[in-house]
Amino acid sequence: MDRANNTQVKHSLTLQYTGTILGLVAGTVLLCWFLNATFLEDYYTYNKQNAILDGFKTIDAESAKGTLNDAEFDVAFENICANDNLSILIINASGSIIRTSVNDATMIKKQFMDVLFEDSKGRSSELLEQGNGYMLEKQIDTRLESEYLVLWGVLSDGNLILMRSALESIRESAWISNRFLTYVGIGAIVISAMISILASRKIARPILELTEISRRMTSLDFNAKYQGKANNEIDLLGEHINQMSENLEKTISELKSANNELQIDNEKKTQIDEMRKDFLSNVSHELKTPLALIQGYAEGLQECINDDEESRSFYCEVIMDEADKMNQMVKKLLTLNQLEFGNDLVSMERFDLTELIRGVIAASSILLKQNGISLTFNTDIPMYVWADEFKVEEVMTNYLSNAIHHADNEKHIDIKYTRMGDHVRVSVFNTGKQIPKEDIGNIWDKFYKVDKARTREYGGSGIGLSIVKAIMDSFHRACGAVNHTDGVEFWFELDTNTPLPQSTANNSCSLP
């Protein structure tokens, strides 16, 4: 990040843009100044030569028409002298002045005579052009340190003409022009610097915004959006970046969802593999004993170890009992398998829990009497709940069956409700031994048995509580077990929308 910031400072778009504009402006100003200093004087001189020649031709044309002294030519003559800053002298063959543009005609006449009679004292000359009736020279007056353009010649009417212009004014004009250009150039550079900074910032601002958006996109932050409204190329780029951000966010979301599903599938596959291994291990272990008994007693019958009817009947009863246990275990395993893999549909309906519990108690009444167990269910008022009635009956049957087989000491079972907000807790308590602390968290696992000898004694498979846990998970409700000083309480919770009666102490049902 720091490296990126340093790069941004070193290669700032504002500095690059401003530097480019300043370079162009400064280069243009310097080029203009160089061209002025080098060629402006020669250009002025060239134009002055043309002006002198044009003036000579105009005057020569008037002399050819014989209108050189007419009043109508006065204005034209004055324009030639004033516009081109020319000193003009026209004399006849006798030396009389016909026309002049200067007040002191004597001095210019003397210079004219010097030119005519080639008096070069204090003067040097350079021939620039020679034509029909005229000669154009550059003359340097060493005494005055002045330089002139001088044209002298003969007009069409035979009169002599001298035209002169000082070059010093040209140099002064060129110098003033260069100095003015310098000032203008400095001002142009300053103004262009200010304008380019403002313009570059205006251009760079949306680009910096796009840079920040792209930086946040590299961190998978797609909340930043470009908000430009200038309707130019940068805004079009910003709109495309916004679309790319939305597409990336959607694609990454889909990839994460697919990855999450794949991870779930992998975990489910791993879980299935583990369950398959556990299932095979546990089933083989659980079936080993009844199969051995069946095989042993069947071999005994085959070999006629005991010929009396009573022994054969006993052998058959053992075989049938063990086969029934195996059948019950397989049924429970199939039920548990359907619950764990979501293949068993849950039908949520409203029913009376009190009536259901009484039905389960009635179905277990023979077992209660055979084991000498007393049972208390302290309500006969309807309790309506929302759940799958068949599955709740299976939960109650498992809890009550488990309580009957583990009831000890006073041999008492207590079933009760506890209202907890929008749901009710159903508890099944039996007196007897507590569940060891190290085992209480494992009792919901398949084939887990706290007291293996006792479980085997009453034909338990260690699957009943696993089925309870799977059913309650399908309801998205809780279940659990709690140790008490005189026994163990198993409980589960169901949704209800009917208030629990305030007093049910006198409405109890007990079985001896």
Image: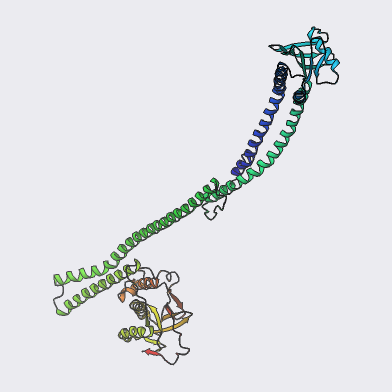
- Vertical relation: 62 (above or below) 365: above
Residue at the farthest bottom position: 506
Quadrant of the rendered structure where residue 319 is?
bottom left
Q: Is residue 371 visible?
A: no
Quadrant of the rendered structure where residue 339 is?
bottom left
- Vertical relation: 35 (above or below) 397: above
203 to the left or right of 255: right
Q: Is residue 438 visible?
A: yes
The residue at 35%/83% (across/down) is 356
- Vertical relation: 151 (above or below) 73: above
Give the quarter of the figure containing the C terminus. Answer: bottom left
Q: Nearer the viewer, residue 276 or 381?
A: 381
Q: Residue 399: x, y in percent?
A: 37, 78
Q: Residue 13: x, y in percent?
A: 61, 41
244 to the left or right of 56: left
Quadrant of the rendered structure where residue 176 is?
top right
Q: Residue 97: x, y in percent?
A: 82, 15
Q: Residue 436: x, y in percent?
A: 43, 72
Q: Nearer the viewer, residue 407 or 196?
A: 196
The residue at 73%/34% (across/down) is 184
Q: Nearer the viewer, residue 375 or 321?
A: 375
Instruction: Report the number of discs.
Output: 0
16 to the left or right of 221: right
